Amino acid sequence: MSTAYDIILEPIMTEKSVYMLEQENKATFQVKYDATKPQIKAAVEELFDVSVEKVNTLIMPSQPRRVGQYIGESSAYKKAYVTLSDDDFLDFYALDSAGQEAGTV
């Protein structure tokens, strides 16, 4: 049985995902490759204490990468767009890496 921490691998923080979070109330996560939409919904609701309206998923294919003379590929992964209800908000910057409020010493 997978826990919520096994399903949600990490939030994706790009310019587009931050804009979607602020304007459309949609959070973006990298999730386990074989996770289903109901599992992702339950994991986000458990971890962040928010209510989820909808989950959209897509598979990001591997892309060719080059480092010097060596050619390889990036790994394929699964991405989930999670639409939150209007009265909920998800703030990734509320806590820093130590688990304390941001801006305090």
Image: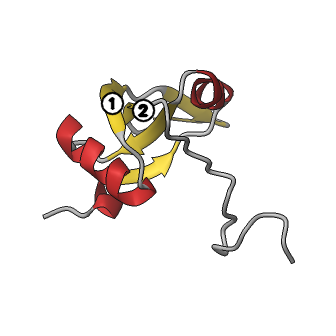
Where residue 37 appears, as percent x and y from the top left, is 22, 36
Q: Report the front residue among 70 and 20.
A: 20
* Residue 93 visible in image: yes
Label 2's element?
loop
* Residue 77 visible in image: no
Where residue 3 appears, as percent x and y from the top left, is 25, 64
Q: Which mark is residue 85?
A: 2
Q: Quadrant of the C terminus?
A: bottom right
Judge left or right: residue 75 versus residue 17.
Answer: left
The amino acid beneath tag 2 is Ser
Whether label 1 touches label 2, CB < 8 Å: yes
Q: Is residue 100 above or below residue 19?
A: below
- Residue ranking furthest to the front: 87
Where residue 90 appears, as percent x and y from the top left, is 55, 45
Please give the name of the residue rendered at 66% of the width and 63% of the height, measured from the top-left corner.
Answer: 95
Q: Is residue 61 above or below residue 104?
A: above
The structure's colour scheme is secondary structure
Judge left or right: residue 33 versus residue 23.
Answer: left
Q: Residues within 10 Å of mark 2 (few under 14, many from 20)?
A: some
Mark 1, residue position? 53
- Distance in Å between CA atoms under marks 1 and 2: 6 Å
- The image quarter containing residue 99 is bottom right
Q: Residues within 10 Å of mark 1 (few under 14, many from 20)?
A: few
- Residue ranking furthest to the left: 1
Q: Report the front residue among 41 and 68.
A: 41
Q: Report the front residue among 65 and 3.
A: 3
Q: Report the front residue among 30 and 82.
A: 82
The amino acid beneath tag 1 is Glu
Label 1's element?
strand
Q: Earlier in the sequence, mark 1 or mark 2?
A: 1
